[in-house]
Amino acid sequence: MAAVDSFQFLYKEISRSCSSYFETLALLGALYAARKAAVLLRDCCTVVRVHFLPRMIPSRKLSQRYGDWAVVYGASEPLARAYAEELARHGINIIFITQDDALVRDAAASLSQTYGVETFVVTVVFSPGRAAIKPIGDALSGRDVGFLVNCVEEELASPQSLIQVPEQDLLDQVNKNVAVVTLLTRLVLPGMVERSRGAVVNISSGPCCRPLRGRVALTAVTGYLDHFSRALHLEYSDKGIFVQSLLPFQIASSRSQPSSPSSSPSREGWFVPSPEVYARHAVSTLGVSNRTTGYWPHTLQYGLIRCVPDWIWILGSRMFIGSS
């Protein structure tokens, strides 16, 4: 009996001495939960502000806000063509910059016929030197270019390690998505600065904002375009130029409009919109957010990815991509 009383007495003394520590831990837990709740509330408000309010509140015409012409690069991708079509639906004339005009000329003719806008296709081969600059400069001359849309061209249909990618394909991917994008921005910006208005939209990849196995070059290109856009916005936003980094997740494709010759079609769904649906949502975010996924279900996906610790992300990348 004495042993039981001694244990109860000892337990009460320990509990009394630890109560202050428990209260401190409870306070820290409450502060952490409040912080997470505040972050969640902020993110919800951001989703409403970026993705819903612009679609409900009427605004000025895009041509009045930015200009009458748009330069679109990377139109071999269905997403770039869909973005150009959405701009054409708003009455914007389109200049396509391409190295292969097989798909682009048909798209340009379709836009002119459907929406009554002017379209122009500039076919250039980007190589060291200034040979490619003259035809682009001639196309821009005398036109009120208010938009520059650069879309990453993804060459690989399936994940490959870096040493599996042919050297020429690797050089082409870096040249198209880094050097050419930077050069086009340099060519278009002076006119925008002179008119004190314009929009530069760089479309890359949301999942590749974090290291992704089998997509080394694409991850690096995405990182470059994302930081390039943010730095450009910091430098030119006070001159009336809006620079946006678009980070979409999976976009549906079809056999009639593949993103690459060897890519397989993907089924359209709520989280996998068609290029046309995505473009309609993305254009509505112009002037609202300089860094966004462009489509609110993708913003939810991005929020989940952002919460995943690095070690879990790397483990999942190795498991799922390595087994595919």
Image (cartoon, rainbow, N blue to C red):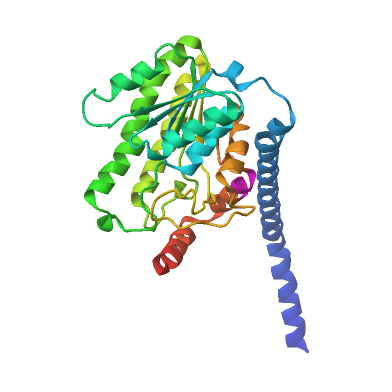
Q: Nearer the viewer, residue 162 or 114?
A: 114
Decide: is 252 above or below 317.
above
Q: In the rendering, at what x and y percent does residue 191 appear?
A: 43, 14
Residue 9 counted in the magenta span:
no
Q: Can residue 219 be seen in this view?
A: yes
The quadrant in which the N terminus is found is bottom right
Q: How far across and down, in percent of the image, does residue 119 sit? A: 47, 25
From the viewer's side, name the closer residue of 256 and 289.
256
Give the prevailing secondary structure in the magenta stretch.
helix
The boundaries of the magenta stretch are 296-300
Q: In which quarter of the image is the C terminus?
A: bottom left
Residue at the (42%, 55%) spot, across then down? 263
- Residue 220 placement, left or right of 92: left
Image coordinates of residue 256 in percent, x first then y, are 49, 50
Q: Residue furthest bottom?
A: 1
Residue in the picture at 31% in, 58% down: 161
Image quadrant assignment for residue 13: bottom right
Q: Between 2 and 108, which is closer to the camera in this rendering?
A: 108
**255 sits left or right of 188 in the view:** right
Query: As rendered, which of 321 and 157 lies closer to the eye?
Result: 157
Who's the residue at 55% across and 19% down the image?
Answer: 66
In this picture, is 105 found above or below 193? below
Number of marks present in the image shown? 0
Q: Where is residue 181 in the image (x, y as percent from the top left)?
A: 37, 31
Is residue 265 left or right of 18 when viewed as pictured? Answer: left
